[in-house]
Image (cartoon, rainbow, N blue to C red):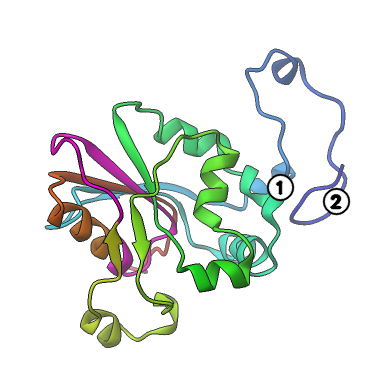
Amino acid sequence: MNCLLCNKPLDDQPTWQQLLGIAKTSSICPACFNGFERIDCVEEDEILDSVHSLYAYNEQARDYLHQFKFMQDIALATVFASELRNVLNDPKKIIVPIPMHPVNKKDRTFAQVDALLEASNIPFTNYLQKTTESVMGEKTRAQRLQMTELFEVLADIPNSELVFILVDDIYTTGTTLRHAARALKNKGAKRVEAVTLFRPIREK
């Protein structure tokens, strides 16, 4: 078996930790995984009660997302399975993936956030539907700020005390997550948190 990122051979001999189920069998090599910079950045604002980003959006992260999303290499969904399980392991919270517009999903053939959660064996609920085909990364900051609501809520919220966790692959300006959180809060949710794999780190 070869590393899914650099294509170099992986060590096929399982360790005793892997045989006992206390260590994961990796789909990428240690050198590639070490290229991801763990930051565990946690912030909050007036709409999002908490945003936890696991890794910096560095060159390795860009290469990963390009291969995963745009080259449609769905096997890469397993790379962060253990890390996502560790931060999304609260059964009292409702996991809500940020959805793709159905047209965009058809073009890409899969929804990347759903794939990440499925590979991690994390139960989730599709509470949201995207109302526009627009992609945030293709817009200027001014255009993002002027956009109307991006999501509609597909089901009633049965209990306002439920805590919702939005999941997305990357946090850039936060516009997408804030739109999603606002949609849920407008339907009665009191607390909406978010977890993302990546986030750009600004130079100080």
**Magenta part of the chain:** 154-177
User: In the shown orientation, is residue 115 left or right of residue 164?
Assistant: right
Check the picture and name the quadrant holding the N terminus. Answer: top right
Q: Quadrant of residue 181?
A: bottom left
User: In the shown orientation, is residue 27 left or right of residue 134?
Assistant: right
Closer to the chain start, of discs 1 and 2, is: 2
Residue type at mark 2 is Lys
Seen as rendered, the residue at the extreme front is 155
Please name the residue shown 70% across and 12% down the image.
20
CA separation in Å, label 1 and label 2: 10 Å
Q: Position of residue 166 (x, y in %)?
A: 34, 49
Q: Are marks 1 and 2 in contact (CB under 8 Å)?
A: yes
Please name the residue shown 88% across and 45% down the image.
9
Give the residue number, with chain letter if any, for mark 1. 31
69 drawn magenta = no
159 drawn magenta = yes
Front-most of 47 and 51? 47
Q: Quadrant of residue 80?
A: top right
Give the residue number, with chain letter if any, for mark 2. 8
Q: Quadrant of residue 105?
A: bottom right
* Disc 2 element: loop
* Disc 1 element: helix
Residue type at mark 1 is Ala
Q: Position of residue 99 (x, y in %)?
A: 43, 59
